[in-house]
Amino acid sequence: MEFRLLGTVAVETYTGPLPLGPAKRRSLLAALLLSANTPVSVGRLTESLWDDTPPSQARGVIQGHVSRLRALLVGADAEAYGVELATLGDAYVLRAPETLVDAQRFEELLMLAREQRSPGDTVLMLKEALSLWQGPALSGAFAGPPLKAAAHSLEESRLATVELLARTYGTLGEYHRAAALLSAETAAHPLRESLAAELMLALYRAGRQSEALDRFHRTRRLLADELGIDPGPKLADAYALILRGDPGPPAAAPAARARVPSRPAAPSAASPASTEVGAVPVAEPPVAGDTAGAPPVVRRPPSSAQPAVHPADPLPVDLLPRAPRGFQGRTAELAALTRAAAGESPVCLVTGPAGVGKTALALQWAHRNEALFPDGRLFADLRGFSEAGEPALIDVLREFLLALGVPPRRVPESAPAAAALFRSLTGRRRLLVVLDNARDSATVRALLPGGTDCVTLVTSRHRLEGLIASDAARPVPLDTLEADDGTALLAGVLGEERVLAEPVAARRLAELCGGLPLALRVTAARLAGRPQWTLAALADELADERGRLAFLDVDDTGVAAALRLTVQHLPPDAVHQLARLGHHPGGHVDPYAAAALAGTDPVAAAAALERLAAAHLVSETAPGRWVLHDLVRLYARGLDPAAAREALVGVLDHGIATALAAADTAEPGGEPCFVLPDGFRRPAAVRDFSDRAEAMRWLSAERENLALAAQAARDAGLEDRAWRIILLQWPQVVWRVRDNWTPLLELALESARAGMDAYAESRVLTLLGWVLTEEGRAAEAAALLERSPRLAREAGDPLGEATALINLAVVRAELGELPAATENCARAVELARREEDRHTEMLALQHLARMRLTARRPEEALAHARTALDLGPEHEEAARRSLLLAVCGEAHLALGQEDDGVRLLDRAAREAEDAGYDEGAVRALEVLVRTTAEPSYRVRHERSALRLATAP
């Protein structure tokens, strides 16, 4: 076990980091660790968790976080490491050996380093100390004033250590290392004069005096501009030392330079002429006796003569392949190309996945716009994704130069000289250059024409962002075809009669091909050669995912072949990531899920996803959200079929860990619903949620993915994962209870029963019964809920029994069985108090208060509701607080205290509205509308009801 403060606040264990949950819990841990083995008062903790006026229930919040943190430590066998979180009166103390706290180890290593006699040993100690830092101190915590001060102090200690390490490098004469170390830190802390001074001296002693002086002047200007001050003594002394030249090594001797004659000699085979500025270089072939591989001699013709390679009155050149047949749609993309081709020396970049029709679009546009290029059109297939490999750059340039009329013997032998000649010859022409299947930006740059009226049209499976940055290339991304255009493409090959005879099957074929033109053309080719086949029969065969890619291959052409050529140019880590993505049961991934699939970390996964996106094998539909085309998914699945179960378990356990963190953040007082399953594989990293809103957004966005993951778990016989993934969505179920959760919960119930797990069955029945109650299916709910308390008792789950009794009480009250309902709720209160679980006790009291109100016992209702509010619900529990306030308001109305009742109901409605809890707002406002004639209540009620009805 290890506690980390030098970076993200964390507790590392043998199985991975503990899921600490919200930022305030990390703040609590940080405050305790900074005073490890010393009691920290609640007052001090309050200052650390809030930087303004703390809420009235701050003590309760701290107690809740301490309770959860203690449970996490106990669950990680902290006692075996000598770690204990204890309560001492009005304070808490985290007892832990100092060796387990990285900040303590840092200070110890720093002290040992200063005691070493050998500079080499000092360097080793200091590097070891700095290696403990993994980012800014106390990251991920909510930094109240004490924690801000502590983080600043730790950072100051780190910077002082960096400066000491640099000076020690200097003692060893390793000034370049010192400069490299200090350069990064100076960039991050440009106003820290001591860093700048050390960097200046390191640069100077490394023989880089000009850089050292430049660093001084930049720092001096920055100090004046930002702070309005002059350099301090350290900076000024370093500057004076450099100017004196004492001490310091002699400047490195300058490299020898080749002599350049002041006047060019007369052109001859043995004496090449220099090229004047503005002259057009003309390449000569190498003379006899030249060294093999030497660059060609470049001569400048007399100013009155034309270059010998320019043909007189050249005819328009045309290297374009024929226009594509059966081209359909792409109206918007063709128009985008026309816009991109406007302007000066434009470079148009058509990008998209393999088989999407990039070459067809480029050729279609080129043939339609022939009149724009009176001097001709050049075309080269750069074969960036071909098994045959890319052509040599000089070969492409030679073909272009020959097409432009350069005699074969005048074509330079080196690519740079040939590129220069190509730019020269195209300088005054109106020419189109189509560069198909480019793999990288560097190759394209060497083939760009020189004329401002020339247009370059590039196609690539990669995004070629370097070309966008360096040459202002204008991207025209190409996506798959819409179903109508895909059907039209089939008709263009098969004939309209055959497609019109089976319109439904034709559309289904277009959808099964995923709108990919290559797949559609292969499908059409199969059908064209078999007139007896029906479109419906082929659609049925394509519907089977196991054989779909095989059906979409004809000879050496097809989707799998095109994808294979793309994949073979990827680095191994990207191929590994793609193979694992094929086994993802959901529709999209983020870097955390991708990492879980591949067995890596989110940083490596994000880098791999970026590479795959650059190759158009995945698409980023939103920041950090990636999807695969269906055919790419099928291909990826076949790259490593044996890894299917391992990948599935990885992503399932990632889903469990992340959903657990989300539920813990959304409902921090809530009791965890289960222990982790056997063989649980803790992900390398779990997403951290800063607050309830972020956690709820994740649960909402991932609902479909989690449902698909649960179904995949059930199908794979991993029932213990299936019900857990579903049950952990309970905060979202509670928030959107009428949002058709029943089918998913029934799947969880099947999984629990298949695993013969009484604990799981009870928990699922409890939640499912409550959902059915809210859907108005009280009789079905009662039948299910009757079994839940007994199952919980069998499983030894008293809190589960309490929750089951509460939900059973709700449905019994719904059915008019109020005495039995009240008895169940009272029993639930007893169980919760016995287990010291405030969250469950508060829930039971809330419903008990509502039942007492229904029984016309407003005094008792008010007492129960106030007791629940006094338990100190955290600020995240807006729904619970709103419902309790509403009960209090209705109780006051029943007691004839209308002003107090309206005030509390209005407060309940506003808190629900502020939290986005529309259901709670509707309930409170309904009572207000019945009670008072205030028009604003009716307006607010209608708005909340509309939001509730139209919520996604």
Image (spheres, rainbow, N blue to C red):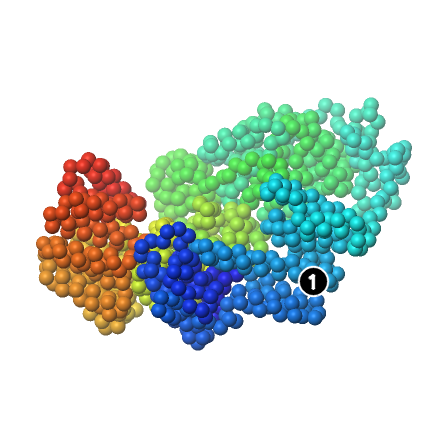
Left or right: residue 484 versus residue 738 is right
| Residue 676 visible in the shown view | no
Location of residue 38 in the rendering, given as x and y in whole percent from the top left corner:
45, 69
* Residue drawn at 65 percent across, 70 percent down: 115
Observer-nearest residue: 313 or 427? 427
Location of residue 63 in the rendering, given as x and y in whole percent from the top left corner:
34, 63
Element on which disc 1 rests: helix
Observer-nearest residue: 315 or 89? 89
Observer-nearest residue: 904 or 422? 904
Image quarter (top left, top right, bottom left or bottom right) of the C terminus: top left
Q: Mark 1 is on which residue type?
A: Thr
| Residue 869 visible in the shown view | yes
Occupied quadrant, residue 823: bottom left
Indicate whether 746 appears above or below 349.
below
Occupied quadrant, residue 501: top left
* Residue drawn at 20 percent across, 50 percent down: 886
Location of residue 766 in the rendering, given as x and y in whole percent from the top left corner:
23, 62
Observer-nearest residue: 569 or 932? 932
Location of residue 798 in the rendering, given as x and y in whole percent from the top left corner:
24, 69
Mark 1 packing: few (<14 Cα in 10 Å), some, or many (20+)?
A: many
Which residue lies under the disc numbered 1? 168
* Residue drawn at 47 percent across, 34 percent down: 330
Please count the marks in the image.
Answer: 1
* Residue drawn at 74 percent across, 34 percent down: 421
